[in-house]
Image: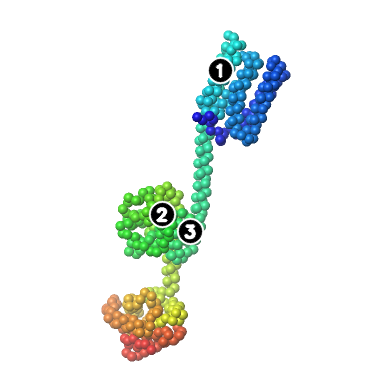
Amino acid sequence: MKLFLDRNKTLLPRLDTFYLLTRVVTLVGLCWYLFVQNETSHGWLSNLLAGIYLVHLGLFLSAIRGKFDVKLAYLSCILFDLIFVPLFISMTGGLHSSFYLLYYLMISVAAYLLTFWFAVATTAIASVTYIVVVWPTLTIAGYYDFSLRIGMLWALFLGISYVAEFLRRSEGRLMKLFDTLNQRTAELERSQAQLEMIYENTRILAAILDTDGVVREVMRIMTTTLQFPTCAVVFRDKRGQFYYRARSVDGHQSLHLKAMDVADDDLIRKVADAHEAIRLKEVRERNDYTPLSDTTRSIMVVPLTTHGTTNGILIAEAPDARQLTDREEQFLSILARSTALALENAELHKRTEELTIIDELTETYNYRYFIQKLQEEKKRAQRYDLPVSLIMVDIDWFKKLNDSYGHEIGNVVLKDLSRIIKRCIRDVDIFARYGGEEFVIILPQTASVEATIIGERIREQVERTVIEAGNAGKLKITVSVGVSSFPENGRSQEELVSVADQALYRAKGSGKNSVCTI
């Protein structure tokens, strides 16, 4: 059974000092009464009581200074008063003694420090002992004073008990409020630090000008800064299908593309169409989304939206819904907006770069890019002892076609020719417009014989194709093709170009619509 109320934290931090001062004043008053007034003949007993009281004060002072538990010091004071106050009263006149006032001090301390029923017991013992010591001197005339003192004793106990309980509850609420405030302050500081880190990371994102770099940085922020061990970046392709561009499952990250099952992208599609983030506490029973991790219970899905269009999604998963709070959703939404802008910037940068190397009319590479790639491919072929070939293509009678139908029809012919050639070559081949109606193709790791076959394929495909030329009707054209190869036709790119050009003009001189090698 608990003896003391919880007073580890107190609303009256100087109570110990105040109480010690009252005990010292009591000792001074006791000594003055016993030795100065000399109204009692109990000389040896007076000295003994004063000495014991002095030792008692010394012990209480030691407790205040931390020598032992101060609660024990208070308990010793209460027990001391229960024993010695009746002796003081008995020695100094019983009912007529003023030392009954010490009971009020004792009851005040007991009501404030002890639990209710122990305080009741202390008050009852004090009442009984007082009755016992004053009974021999009690008269009918003194009943009023006697009753008043006992009543005041209990009234004081009840009043201070109520105040003590009120203070204890207020103290508990206040301390709980302080703890909550400290917790919220700590959370706010963490949120502030995390928010600053996110904004710093988004600044870094804005400086990244390639999509792969943006994706890697976003995954780093989600796994490290936001601490989502299971998360993903989802993109939508031109056909409207979603796929994982990057993902982390229980801390294991992968940047390899992975298609998303059609049956599992309904939830993703809804978020993308609504352009709004959602947070779900339970997804294990849903049939419109399959979690990345087997331990996932809750998810956040945030769209990557710019200019009213959503082309991607950020996903964060957690095994417990409490890990995905409003704060995490706010942070992920900030990251999503920054990511969408960074991806848009990367795409714009890519398009800008392409404009500097792409021929606007035919959508093939331009002459400057061709020269750069030819130099790179020739160096690579020379270093690893690999072949590389060059094909030059020129439209037969193109000047006559322009004079007859106009440059607008000539541009239509150039566009269709570029599309025909693209269908005849490989993805690794580099197709560029050399100038005017001439085109050139770099064929990495391709020998002369194979290049000639590809040149013949281009010539045949062009000859068979009918071009829809608008007002000019249906047109058919032919091309002349020249082929050169490394190392047979030269060691430098200038020699390769020169030989291919010579082969092209030999093809034109031999009747056009032919493929020639030197």
In percent of width and height, residue 218 lies at 45, 59
The numbered mark, 2 or 3, whose residue comes first in the sequence reads 3
Please tell me which residue is depicted at 38% across the width and 83% down the height of the picture. Answer: 447
Q: Nearer the viewer, mark 1 or mark 3?
A: 1
Spatial separation of the CA atoms under disc 1 and disc 2: 72 Å
* Colour mapping: rainbow
Quarter where residue 360 is shown: bottom left
Res. 316 mark: 2
Is residue 282 depicted above or below 308 in this figure?
above
Spatial separation of the CA atoms under disc 1 and disc 3: 78 Å
In percent of width and height, residue 164 lies at 54, 29
Q: Which residue is mark 3?
A: 202
Callout 2, which amino acid? Ala
The numbered mark, 1 or 3, whose residue comes first in the sequence reads 1
Please tell me which residue is depicted at 46% across the width and 54% down the height of the picture. Answer: 227
Q: Nearer the viewer, mark 1 or mark 2?
A: 1
Is residue 120 depicted above or below 208 in this figure?
above
The numbered mark, 1 or 2, whose residue comes first in the sequence reads 1
Please tell me which residue is depicted at 44% across the width and 54% down the height of the picture. Answer: 228
Is residue 477 depicted above or below 280 in this figure?
below
In the figure, is residue 49 to the left or right of 445?
A: right
Q: Which residue is mark 1?
A: 128
Is residue 283 depicted above or below 358 in this figure?
above
Q: Is residue 452 visible?
A: yes
Callout 3, which amino acid? Thr
Residue nearer the viewer, 205 or 101: 101
Residue nearer the viewer, 111 or 431: 111
Spatial separation of the CA atoms under disc 2 and disc 3: 18 Å
In percent of width and height, residue 378 lies at 44, 81
Please tell me which residue is depicted at 57% across the width and 20% down the height of the picture. Answer: 126
